[in-house]
Amino acid sequence: MVTEKPPRQRTCLLYAALAALLVLLWQTLSVQFNYGGNWTALFYTGDARPLPPELGGKTYVFKGSDGYDGQFYRYVAHDPLFQRGAWKYIDIPEHRYRRILVPGLAWLLACGQPRFIDGAYVVIVLLFVFVGAYWLSRYALFHAQHPAWGVGFAFVPATLISMDRMTVDVSLAALCVGFAWYARKGSLGRLWGVVALAAFTREIGFLLAAAACGHALWNRRWRRALLFAAAVLPALLWYWFVSDHLQGVPPPAKAGLVPAWMFEYPLVGIVLKLFHPEHYPLGPAALLVARVIDVLALLGILLALGLALWRLRRWRWDEETTAMLLFAGLTIAVSAPAFWKDVSGYARIITPLLLLVGLRAVSGGPVWRLLPILLVDLRIGVLLGSKALSILHGIFKAAM
């Protein structure tokens, strides 16, 4: 087993702080030069549905838009215990309320004070960037690699999307790194904590518990398997609490555990999308470039899937590999071609697979294992490109 060099926690903390500062810098510049200084724009609230009355006057609203998921998690953060009726303004409240970790922590950090909750939400997202980067630095040191790898956490797909649209997926990405780090370190108590928290991020967070349990069962460690199974009980109790408070609410507000975009035609959706590219209102040359970048991102995900499945040739897997294979199974189960239409949607869900495949490079393996992340990041970069140009234009104008 590879052992960690003498602890350099301060160095890891510095690189983690750098990752968080990079994200904060983007957010600050984007808010200043794209949204006139209104930080609520990061939640990407659309005007297609009404806002909770207490949030209407101070919210940056995108005209002619459905908005994005961050707007709903913001509503949850303002009313996590169903006291103000915020669920009435959420598309699928049962789904959103289940994913309570980030909104709930924001509410706690703000001590339930509405005027502080939006800022607290941004801080919690930055905190998960910091923690994910710190764990990645420690993971690299454990394998005798440079702790600067931790800064790379700022550039994984879930982080890029969460920093721009305040989605909750950065929390699961960070916990996946923590899962790999504590599994390698053999820190059972902290690994249990990571598994318990992951179940509160979103439904697919339960796969980390399944990985820990599955690995323990494979090695006939029955008590350990029972211990990790118990880690999801708090989340299940929360699910019951949410369901109980939404009794009598008609579909689509009520939701099952398994999303509709899974299991219909496993693996077919992404392949079909390769041959049915999106149409953009662009000229011929620009349209060709856009479609090539779309295809490269999807090919990156298929490459990550292939690299994960290649590990099946081994009969013995550690917890990290088991988790990677489970997230590979999730990727195969995603069957609806529409799921692969928007990179902001699919990249967040697939980030755990991309991360766990990429950790092979962080542990001293071939750097090209990062290629799936880079190809998906390229597509996200196009999505963020117009905002980046506005930032550069604003900086240039201010400097003149």
Image (cartoon, rainbow, N blue to C red):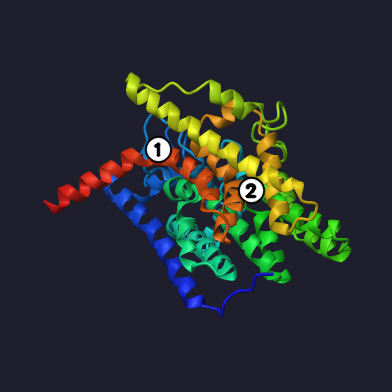
**Hey, what amino acid is under mark 2?**
Arg
Residue furthest out toward the bottom: 6
Label 1: state its secondary structure.
helix
- Which quarter of the picture shows residue 184? bottom right
**Hey, what amino acid is under mark 1?**
Leu
Q: Nearer the viewer, mark 1 or mark 2?
A: 1
Q: CA distance from mark 1 to mark 2?
A: 24 Å
Q: How many marks?
A: 2
**Residue at image coords 62%, 49%:** 99
- Which of the pair 259/120 is nearer the observer? 259
Disc 1, disc 2: CB below 8 Å?
no
In the rendering, which numbered label is found on residue 354?
none
Q: Residue under circle 2?
A: 202
**Residue at image coords 46%, 39%:** 51
**Residue at image coords 76%, 58%:** 212
Q: Quadrant of the N terminus?
A: bottom right
Residue furthest out toward the front: 366
**Residue at image coords 64%, 41%:** 305
Quick check: 273 above or below 242?
Answer: above
In the rendering, which numbered label is found on residue 383?
1
Kindly tell me whether residue 52 is visible in this rendering.
no
Residue 342 location (% of width, % of height): 50, 33
Label 2: state its secondary structure.
loop
- Which of the pair 331/171 is nearer the observer? 331
User: Dot 1: few (<14), some (14–19), or many (≥20) neighbours within 10 Å?
Assistant: some
State left or right for residue 281 relative to residue 327.
Answer: left
Residue furthest out toward the left: 400
State left or right for residue 269 relative to residue 189.
Answer: left
Residue 253 location (% of width, % of height): 64, 35
Residue 254 location (% of width, % of height): 68, 36
Residue 286 location (% of width, % of height): 34, 25
Kindly tell me whether residue 289 is visible in this rendering.
yes
